[in-house]
Amino acid sequence: MSGREEAHTRKVTALHELPQAIEPPRDLWPGIEARLEPVMAGAPSVSEAQLSAARRRTQRLRWFAAAAMVASVAVGVWIGRSLLPTGSRVQGSSLAAFDAPTALDAAYVTDPRYQRQRAALLRSLESQIATLPPATRTKVMASLATIQHAKEDLEQALGKDPGNALLQELLVNTYQDEMRVLSDVREASDSGKGI
C-alpha cells in the first residue's frame, strides 16, 4: 500500500494529523481554460465609450444618493424640532412644577391611563405630604425635586439628540420612578405609617 492510499484508509483522530497540502493527481487548469475560451470568445468586448458611460451613470447615482441623504437628515431635523421642547421650564419651589406637562410628556408618555393616574396622584400630593412626619416630608420633597431635575436634564439632552435610545430609556425610567414615589406617598399617608 502506498503512502497516499494509507492516508486515505487510516483514521484521523486529531487535526494536526491531517496533511498540510494535498496535490491533485493531475493539473486541472488546462481543462478549466479549455471550457472558458468559448465563453470568453462569445462575450462582447466592452469599449471605452461604454465604460465611460457606465462611470457617468455610477457618478450620477452617487450624487442622487448624497442628495437623498441630505434631504432625509433635513426632514428628520425638522420633525425633531417640531416635536421636542425648545425652551427650559422655570423651576419653582412649589409642587406646581411637577404638574406642568412638557412636549416630551406627550411624545414619550402617551398612555391615557398613565396620564390619569399621574394627574390624580399630583392633585392629592400636597394634602398627603402634609400628613407625613417632617423628616419623611423632607425626604419625599427631595426625591421629587431630584426626579424633576433628572426629567428636565433628560428632556434637554433629548432635545439635542432626539434619536438617542439610552436617553429615551432613562426618561421612561425617570417617569416610572416618579410614579413609584407618588404611589408610596399615597400609601404612606393612607396607612399613617410613613414611608
Image (cartoon, rainbow, N blue to C red):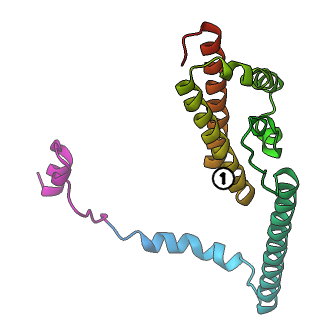
Q: Which residue is mark 1?
A: 164
- Circle 1: is it few (<14), some (14-19), or many (20+) Cα within 10 Å? few
Q: Residue at x 55, y 16 (%)?
A: 194
Question: Residue 112 location, x and y as percent?
Answer: 83, 25
* Residue closest to the eye, 4 or 130: 130
* Residue closest to the eye, 120 or 42: 120
* Residue closest to the eye, 44 or 188: 188
Vertical order, 145 against 186 (above or below): below
Q: What range of the chain is rendered magenta?
A: 1-25
Q: Is residue 106 left or right of residue 141?
A: right
Q: Is residue 22 left or right of residue 92?
A: left
Q: Residue at x 64, y 40 (%)?
A: 145
Q: Secondary structure at mark 1?
A: loop
Q: Is residue 176 left or right of residue 5?
A: right
Q: Amino acid at mark 1?
A: Asn
Is residue 35 a member of the stretch shown in magenta?
no
Question: Residue 103 location, x and y as percent?
Answer: 83, 45
Secondary structure mostly taken by the magenta-highlighted segment of the chain: loop
